[in-house]
Structure formats: structure tokens, C-alpha cells
Image (cartoon, helix red, strand yellow):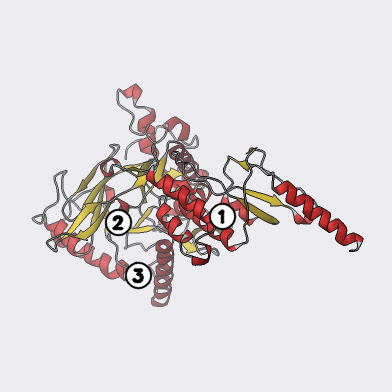
């Protein structure tokens, strides 16, 4: 044995002894840490059944490039010996994927993945992780579907100075839009309060009863004690031409990572790509806080048809035939990307009409145009978000005698949303779900900020404190238009 081999053996033996005494940390290490350079080691860590989702296993980095022999242990480590799992091993890779699934409360999915490889079925770390997920799953609480709130936004203001520049459109932006800074603060506040994003389809689902009749049944949402499910939607994701130059995104595209993102044109006609509206900003937040999303849920994205979809001119009066066909193909591609990444698509009507007030002939024409010009692009959708919150009925349940409801139902719609400022309002009928949505815009926040002085109750305190969120760049007061 030469001197080099002797020293290498000494280092290996010293490292082995050190690893035998490495402690297990009690804090969480983000899954993103797995992407950094160097060799990583997993430590098996029991997952408790507290109200928090099980954290991903702790990792210890050994920086091979530095020449250091001593593993770097998280400062939060506590004394407790444990078996070491190499992250690049089959067991380590499986545990990593399972932890990502479990972070979104899908413990059944995480367990199924861990049980999917027969060669690893007896691995102690795999068995321990399964037992931990089973224990946490048993502690989950069934959410009350009738108490699920639904919040919504329009396109987000990305450049306050351009949106609030005093021109004719400023008043509308100030009233019904939310700034990007406000949106990010709202997300953080709701996350801190224990809200978890769910799909509309999690609230209720279509099934067949014992008589063979198609019916709507309440869904089952299981979350840790203290967590509160909510639905989010965005109206008018069309990027209207009148918004050009006013500090908004200009269209949605498929990013290099395969996820939906946005383009935004700036003053010198340069086009930027990045998180310039709700979709990519929400995606960013969920990547940092995977426990904000229930089983991969994202928001509901709604658009009208007459001005185009997702920033693409899909109505033939806005483009020549060649451009029209190209825009249609790209809009369909982006819509599929949204669906593939957990987003739900919805109708906001074809012509952005007061659906509860227009006559039946116009109602049929509008619904037919949606089916012909938008369904054909993005695929069938079963959610409709009424423009202006203008419902086709009062609070009484929909029935077959309601001609507009029957027409929408026959067109494939099952989920119907109006606008309601109450904390929650849900109605599940025999064959539909109906939900009220809360607008989180400049007007609603201003009303909350002035509630006490005007002798009213605040409407947003369960979500956030308006003064902590309201953008100082907004012109005040914010009047109702």
C-alpha cells in the first residue's frame, strides 16, 4: 500500500466514524437544496403527525471540491444517530419524489410511489417513510365544503406608474385591478393564516347514483388541523389591446421550463419574459411553499372570446387569416400547458355580457360562440365565471325550469360562480355547484380600510389586513365606478 492509498483509507475511515455520529436536524430543508452541487446524503427522519405536512428528509452536503473530509451538518441539528441514505441511490431518489408529493398533502400518492418498486419494498428507510405518511394521513381533518372561500383577481398591475398615470383608464385599473406587490402580500398573509389552495373540482364531483342518474356530490378534502381550503380564480385573461403600454403583461406563453409564463412589452418595444401576472407569480409562490397547494392545485383561469384568449387574437375580425390560424394554434398550446400544470380553465362568456340580464336569444348566441370559437381551441370547460358577477338566478337553487341554466348545462357547464362579498357562499344542487367569489381589488381593499369610519364591518380580515397590503402608489380614495 503506497502513502497516497494509506492517506485515502485514513480519510475514509475518519469520515465513516463521523457519519456514525451525525445528528438528525429537526428543521426542514427545501427540496431545492437537492439541486446544488456536491454529494448529498439523506438522513432518515420520523415524520410526526402534527398539523404541518411532513418535511422532506434532511440533507447533509459533503463538498467534494473543497477537499474537506467533514460533512457540513445543519446548525439546527440535534443529537440522534441515524442510518444514512445516499440521495443518488434508488432509495434516495424515491424518497425525494415521495417527499415532494407529500408536501402537497397527497399522502396516498406518496405511499403508492414508495410501494411501486418491488426491489425497494423492504428497504428500512422506505418502510419508515410509509409508516410516517400513514400516521400523518390518519391525523387529517375533513374540510367543510360549505365553508370554502373563493377569491378572484383580474390582470395584475406590474408597473404602477404606467397604470396610475392619470389617463382615462386609470380609474378602472384603480378600482378592479390588484398590483403585483399587493398580490404577493395577499398570498403571504393567506399562507401565514393556514389557507391552502384547492381546485373547484375538489369541492364537488359528478357521479352516477344507484338509479343511474348523473348527480353532483360534495368532494372530500383532507387537511391538517387548522388548515383552510380556498379557491382562486382570475377573470379576463385576455390582455386586451387597450391595456397596451399601461403596465400589464401582453400575453401568456409556454416557458423554457414547460410551465406557463408571461411576456411584457416595455417602452423601447423590448419584450421581456417572466413573472408578469398572476399565473407565474402564483407558480413562483407555490414552488417556494409547496404546502400552499393541495395535491398540485392551481387557480381557475377564465377568459372571454371576442377579444381573444391569453393574449392571442382568436376572433377573426382582429387578424388576417394566416395570423388568426397561428394565434389559434399558440393559444391552444398555452391552454394545454395550463391544464397540464394543474390550472383549471373557465368561460367568462364569449362577449363579457350580463348573462342574467340579456334576452334568451342573445344568451344562446353568446354561449354558442363560446363553444364554436373557444371550446374548439382550449377543449371543453365546465366552469363559468359570470361577468360582473351577474348570475342567471337569485339565491334560490337552479332548476330545469330556468331556461338559461338548462342551456348552459346542456353546453357542458357544471360549476357556476357569481360575485359575493361574504366569507363564503356555496350551493350544491342535484347536478351543479354554485359558488360566490370575493373580489380582492383596489375598491374592495379601500372599503375595508374605511369600514370603521363609515360604520361598516370589514370583509377581508379573515384573509389579510387591508392596510398591510394596500399599495401606496394607488390614487385615493378609490371610488366605485
Q: Secondary structure at mark 2?
A: loop
SS at mark 1 in the image: loop
Q: Is residue 419 above or below residue 320?
A: above
Of callouts 1 and 3, the N-terminal one? 1
Closer-to-camera residue (107/397): 107
- Front label number (1 vs 2): 2
Cα distance in 3D space between marks 1 and 2: 31 Å
1 shown above or below 45:
below
**Front residue of this view, candidates 74 and 152:** 74
Q: Dot 3, crowdedness within 10 Å: few (<14), some or many (≥20)?
A: some
Report which residue position mark 3 lands on. 377
Q: Residue at x 30, y 22 (%)?
A: 455
Name the element at disc 3: helix
Dot 1, how many residues are within 10 Å of its Cα: few (below 14), some (14-19), or many (20+)? few
What residue would you read off at disc 1? Answer: 267
Question: How far is the residue under mark 2 from the one under mark 3?
Answer: 15 Å
Q: CA distance from mark 1 to mark 3?
A: 32 Å
Residue 87: image quadrant is: bottom right
Query: Is the C-beta separation of discs 1 and 2 under 8 Å?
Result: no
Q: Quadrant of the C terminus?
A: top left
Vertical comparison of 112 with 176: above or below: below
Indicate which disc residue 59 carries.
none
Which residue is label 2 attached to?
Answer: 348
Spot occupied by residue 210 in the image (x, y as percentages of width and height) = 14, 60
Residue 221 in sight in this render: yes
| Image quadrant where one finds the N terminus | bottom right
User: Would you say 35 lies left or right of 116 here?
Assistant: right
Point out the frontmost of discs 1 and 3: 3
Q: Residue furthest left?
A: 401
Amino acid at each position: 500500500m503506497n502513502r497516497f492509498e494509506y492517506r485515502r483509507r485514513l480519510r475514509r475511515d475518519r469520515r465513516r466514524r463521523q457519519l456514525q455520529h451525525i445528528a438528525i436536524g429537526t428543521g426542514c430543508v427545501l427540496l431545492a437544496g437537492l439541486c446544488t452541487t456536491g454529494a448529498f446524503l439523506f438522513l432518515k427522519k420520523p415524520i410526526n403527525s402534527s398539523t404541518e405536512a411532513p418535511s422532506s428528509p434532511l440533507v447533509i452536503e459533503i463538498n467534494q471540491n473543497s477537499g474537506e473530509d467533514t460533512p457540513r451538518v445543519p446548525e439546527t441539528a440535534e443529537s440522534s444517530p441515524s442510518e444514512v441514505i445516499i440521495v443518488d441511490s434508488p432509495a434516495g431518489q424515491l424518497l425525494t419524489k415521495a417527499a415532494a408529493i407529500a408536501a402537497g398533502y397527497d399522502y396516498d400518492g406518496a405511499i403508492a410511489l414508495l410501494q411501486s418498486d418491488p426491489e425497494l419494498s423492504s428497504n428500512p428507510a422506505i418502510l419508515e417513510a410509509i409508516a410516517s405518511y400513514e400516521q400523518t394521513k390518519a391525523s387529517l381533518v375533513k374540510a367543510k365544503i360549505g365553508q370554502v372561500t373563493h377569491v378572484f383577481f383580474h390582470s395584475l398591475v406590474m408597473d404602477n406608474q404606467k397604470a396610475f398615470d392619470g389617463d382615462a383608464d386609470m380609474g378602472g385599473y384603480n378600482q378592479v385591478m390588484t398590483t403585483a406587490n399587493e398580490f404577493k402580500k395577499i398570498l403571504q398573509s393567506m399562507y401565514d393564516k393556514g389557507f391552502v389552495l384547492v381546485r373547484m373540482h375538489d369541492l364537488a364531483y359528478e357521479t352516477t347514483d344507484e338509479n343511474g342518474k348523473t348527480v353532483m356530490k360534495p368532494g372530500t378534502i383532507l387537511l391538517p388541523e387548522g388548515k383552510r381550503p380556498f379557491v382562486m380564480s382570475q377573470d379576463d385573461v385576455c390582455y386586451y389591446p387597450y391595456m397596451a403600454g399601461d403596465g400589464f403583461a401582453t400575453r401568456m406563453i409556454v416557458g423554457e421550463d414547460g410551465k406557463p409564463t408571461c411576456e411584457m412589452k416595455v417602452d423601447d418595444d423590448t419584450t421581456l419574459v417572466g413573472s408578469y401576472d398572476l399565473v407565474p407569480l402564483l407558480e413562483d409562490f407555490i414552488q417556494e411553499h409547496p404546502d400552499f397547494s393541495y395535491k398540485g392545485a392551481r387557480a381557475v383561469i377564465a377568459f372571454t372570446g371576442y377579444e381573444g384568449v391569453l393574449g392571442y387574437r382568436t376572433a377573426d375580425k382582429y387578424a388576417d387569416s394566416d395570423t388568426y390560424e397561428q394565434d389559434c394554434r399558440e393559444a391552444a398550446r398555452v391552454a394545454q400547458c395550463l391544464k397540464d400544470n394543474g390550472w383549471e380553465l373557465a368561460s367568462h362568456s364569449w362577449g363579457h355580457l350580463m348573462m342574467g340580464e340579456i334576452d334568451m336569444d342573445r344568451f344562446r348566441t353568446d354561449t354558442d360562440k363560446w363553444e364554436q370559437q373557444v371550446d374548439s381551441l382550449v377543449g371543453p370547460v365546465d366552469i363559468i365565471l359570470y361577468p360582473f358577477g351577474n348570475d342567471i338566478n337569485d339565491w334560490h337553487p337552479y332548476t330545469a325550469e330556468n331556461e338559461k341554466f338548462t342551456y348552459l348545462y346542456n353546453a357542458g357547464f357544471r360549476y357556476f360562480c357569481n360575485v359575493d362579498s361574504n366569507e363564503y357562499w356555496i350551493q350544491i344542487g342535484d347536478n351543479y355547484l354554485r359558488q360566490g367569489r370575493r373580489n380582492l381589488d383596489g375598491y374592495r381593499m379601500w372599503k375595508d380600510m374605511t369600514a370603521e369610519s363609515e360604520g361598516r364591518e370589514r370583509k377581508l380580515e379573515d384573509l389579510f389586513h387591508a392596510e398591510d397590503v394596500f399599495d401606496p402608489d394607488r390614487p385615493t380614495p378609490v371610488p366605485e365606478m
